[in-house]
Image (cartoon, rainbow, N blue to C red):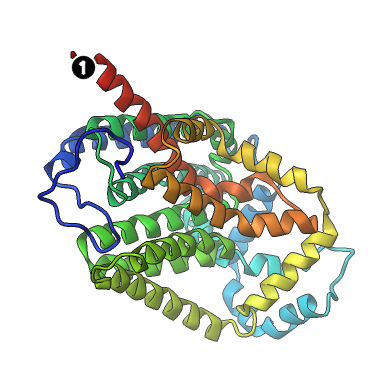
Amino acid sequence: MQDEGSAPRRTENPPHAVGVVLPGGRAGAAGPRLRLVLLLVFVAGWALAAIKPPLAEVHWDAPIMLYASKRVVDTDFHANFVRDAAEVARQVEQADWDRSVSYFPEPFWVFTKLGHLSLLAGFVALGDTPEAGLRIAHLGFGALLAASVAMAMLLARNLALLRGWSGSPWSLAAGLAVAGLSCVLSGIFWYMSGNFVSEVPALFFVCAALLALSAALRRGSRALAALSGVLLFAAYWCRPDFAWVAICVALLVLLVAIRRPRPRSVTLMPILVGAGFAILGFAVYAWIYHPLADPRLYAAFAGLLRSYAPNPPEHFFRLFVISGGLLWIGVLLALFMRPWSRGVGFGLAWLGLTGLPWLVQAMLGSAAQSRMFLMAWPPLFLLAALGWAALFERARHVRRPA
């Protein structure tokens, strides 16, 4: 089936193990232009963080996270969790904690963000004064968010090529540019810029992990696959649920590979290597902080949050739409212009799998906030980029003389 573009497929490129056409010279023709676009999007996103005053228009958790990061710098923060692990776990298992202090077991909540707090502490420690540390952390987290957008653009490009984009490289580069700029210009980006919440570093690391994995799939590189596993564990260390979006894309790639009669080692090996390194990182983490890394504790904690702030199911959907910002325009274009293309189908399946836990939480009436849905940005970027690219491709053919 012909994909997003209408140009004929190049027959000299051999099919890849995941059932795609490896890009040849045409795919890289827009390389310098795309690098310029990535730089402009990153600079624009970081400039917004520079304009925004520290701790202005941020989530109420941001000052709490800032204070906790100072504790990481000034106290034996990690050693205390190792020492008190059994008590912290008991509070969650038995739902027994000091409710005059918090509506939920706060020590375990902090534990689920150890990677995030450690990274934030690193930024804060760079300042000679508290004010300088705050400014550096503000700009640092703004840079992480802007870099996440740039990496999501590159990831969308890699996945579009892996799924057989056959149109003009210029159209794809233009689609990526509009998707990136539309995200930066969205209200959710302004809100998250300079925000010291765990979603920012988790999004950064999961985008980096997926970018490394997609590059490993295209090049057959085990080193990049190993790097993707390390980065995926870093995302988990910042916010555990963000690892799910990477697991979903790996499952979909494997599903596509299984349906192909060709050898699957080119697909299977990078995913296995990446998974192995991620599991190794988690095993070390679980050994150090035993029993706090038990996933059942995280599920029990999520159940306690449901009783803390119940919400109707439609609240989840509203926040999900808000979190996508202007990316939804490109998504709608993809649905209307190329609903049955392989790239769009892959993006929709990825988005659907990513949203399954939210669907369950919505039915249970769990608490929700718009920032938690940033996990959907990678699949939304793929769909938005393909939607805008399809529009530019159609315009290119309309302008072409008969």
Query: Is residue 168 shown above or below 244?
Result: above
> In the rendered view, does 363 fall on the left or right side of 400?
right
Q: Position of residue 401 (x, y in %)?
A: 18, 13
Residue 383's x, y, as percent?
Answer: 44, 41
From the top left corner, tell me how far across and down residue 109 is, in percent.
Answer: 69, 65
Circle 1: residue type:
Arg
Indicate the position of residue 281 as horizontal and vertical percent values: 44, 77
Q: Nearer the viewer, residue 177 or 335?
A: 335
The residue at 19%/37% (across/down) is 8
Query: Alpha-carbon neighbours of circle 1 within 10 Å: few (<14), some, or many (≥20)?
Result: few
The relative height of residue 11 versus residue 338 in the rendered view (above or below) is below
Provide the residue designation for mark 1. Answer: 400
**Nearer to me, 55 or 287:** 287
Helix or strand or loop: what does disc 1 sit on? Answer: loop
Residue occupying the point 38% across, 78% down? 276
Where is the C terminus found, in terms of image quarters? Answer: top left
